[in-house]
Image (tube, grey):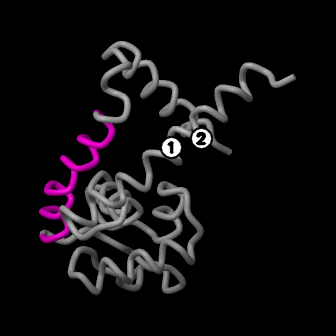
Amino acid sequence: MSTEAEQAWRAIYRAYMRMAPTIDKELKKLAGLTYSEYEVLAQLKAAAGPMKMAELASHVAVTRTHASRLIESLKDAGLATHEKNPYDGRSFLVAITTEGLRRLQESASAVESVFAESVGSFVSASELSQLTAWANHAVANDT
């Protein structure tokens, strides 16, 4: 018999897996970005300055290799920069460009719209606030 925690986790996972393709499709259509690229841009904006590639990978929950591929794609599109760290030649610093900020703002409505359509009809503002607090707590305590 499944525990309540396992049932909760599986439900969250299934909900995410159902929403992710729709969000990807809408983002591609509206802004030419995948959700992973959107998340990288959002993390770079939140950093308010250049961040190390390894730190970015950790925040976006992808491997360094995947983060590098995402940054290369964003760099090629003029949405991010990628430069050697002047203080540590073994690492790279990445940052969002002005065009990356514009594209991020443009695409945020697509993410909000898909999320609202997916959960807005049955999740109250209070429940959404609790879900956000739980998710932020889970990420903050990730080891």
Q: Does 100 sit left or right of 59 as displayed?
A: left
The residue sitting at 41% across, 16% down in the picture is 127
Q: Give the range drawn in magenta.
A: 99-116
User: Which residue is at a point 53% across and 30% down the rendered structure image?
Assistant: 137
Name the amino acid, label 1: Tyr
Q: Which mark is residue 13?
A: 2
Looking at the rendered structure, the secondary structure element under dot 2 is helix
If the image is split into quadrants, where does the N terminus sit?
top right
Residue designated by label 1: 16
> Could you tell me if the residues under marks 2 and 1 are in contact, i.e. CB atoms within 8 Å?
yes
**Drawn side of residue 108 relative to residue 60, left or right:** left
User: Does dot 1 land on a helix, a strand or a loop?
Assistant: helix
Inter-mark Cα distance, 2 to 1: 5 Å
x then y, percent, for residue 70: 42, 75
Which residue occupies 37% across, 29% down? Answer: 119
- Classify 36 as above or below 8: below
Quick one: 18 or 84, which is closer to the camera?
18
Per the rendering, the mark at residue 88 is: none
Q: Where is residue 106 in the image (x, y as percent from the top left)?
A: 14, 57
Q: Where is residue 46 in the image (x, y as percent from the top left)?
A: 30, 51
Q: Does the magenta stretch include residue 114?
A: yes
Q: In this view, does 128 lie to the left or right of 29?
A: right
Residue 36's spot in the image, x, y percent?
Answer: 41, 62
Question: Could you classify mark 1 by the number of other residues whose Cα lies within 10 Å: few (under 14), some (14-19), or many (20 or more)?
Answer: few
Most foreground residue, 39 or 44? 39
Q: Name the residue: 54% across, 37% down.
A: 140
